[in-house]
Image: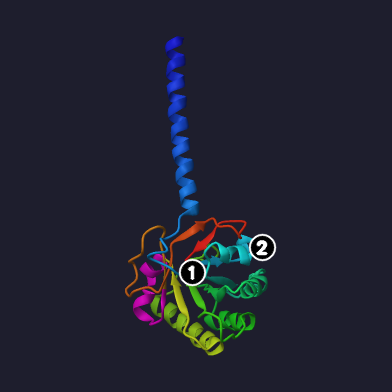
Amino acid sequence: MRRFLNRACILAGISLSFALIGLTAWLFVLVWRPATADFPVQGAYVSAEQGPIDWFTLRANGASFAYIVATTGVEQPDHRFSANWAGSFQADVRHGAVHRFSLCRLARDQAWRFTRIVPASSDALPAALELHFRADCRARPERRVVIGEIETFLRIAEAHTGKPMILKIAPSFERHYQVSRAIRRPLWAEQSFYPPEYLTRPWQLWQASSLHRVAGANRTLGWV
């Protein structure tokens, strides 16, 4: 019995050690951001998923700018876009709008929605077009069709904003369609912890974390 109890205590101690290691690693993930010596200008990527944001606190904790989701496909706009757009402006956090592109909707219809929601503001950052495979869209059109649709969206949206858009391309989308090779726009890459190399040209923005925890936001957010 004593031997059994000793073995149980050892196993419990090992389990506790692994749990503490896991907790430490998770806390590291939540607070990690690239070194400011290497990347002095950093910001946030937000949507309604973060809930209400205290923009003054977010700015005080390192967000020099923010990219704010405005629209997705042709669905209703992000219900916190107006509040986030106004709040970031009031807190002197430079902001840009994001459209989440859908392969299941015509680009012209998506651009129409985007241009009616996002203000044409000369002091805004260039808007971003997010290219991900979405769970609610299983379509995978041919590459030439997708490239043509992206170009249609850009032509309409850029005529509205007056600036070239940034292409925020997920690794899986880039592998499938090689967008960075076909369309010459500034690029936004995504990869946690290590600078990404999957695009065919140098990127201008890097989303280094999608799980960053920072004062000012009630939930984790993207950190750029």
Q: Distance between the residues labelled 2 and 1?
A: 33 Å
Q: Which of 150 and 91 is in front in this view?
A: 91
* Mark number displayed over residue 52: 2
Which mark is nearer the camera, 2 or 1? Answer: 2
As drawn, is 24 to the left or to the right of 123? Answer: left
Query: Could you tell which of marks 2 and 1 lies nearer the N-terminus?
Result: 2
Which residue is disc 1 drawn over?
A: 139
Q: Where is residue 137 in the image (x, y as percent from the top left)?
A: 53, 67
| Magenta stretch prevailing secondary structure | helix
Q: Nearer the viewer, residue 19 or 88?
A: 88
Q: Extreme top residue here? A: 1
Q: Nearer the viewer, residue 81 or 29?
A: 29
Q: Badge 2 local density, few (<14 within 10 Å), some, or many (20+)? A: some
**Three-letter amino acid code at disc 1?**
Ala
Q: Position of residue 42 (x, y in %)?
A: 47, 67
Q: Residues in magenta?
A: 171-187
Residue 94 visible to the viewer:
yes
- Kindly indicate the quadrant of the structure image that contains residue 96: bottom right
Q: Badge 1 local density, few (<14 within 10 Å), some, or many (20+)? A: few
Q: Is residue 14 placed above or below 136 in the rendered structure?
A: above
Q: Where is residue 178 in the image (x, y as percent from the top left)?
A: 36, 73
As drawn, is 66 to the left or to the right of 21? Answer: right
Is 175 included in the stretch rendered in magenta? yes
Query: The residue tagged with tag 2: helix, strand or loop?
Result: loop
Is 44 included in the stretch rendered in magenta? no
Query: The residue tagged with tag 1: helix, strand or loop?
Result: loop
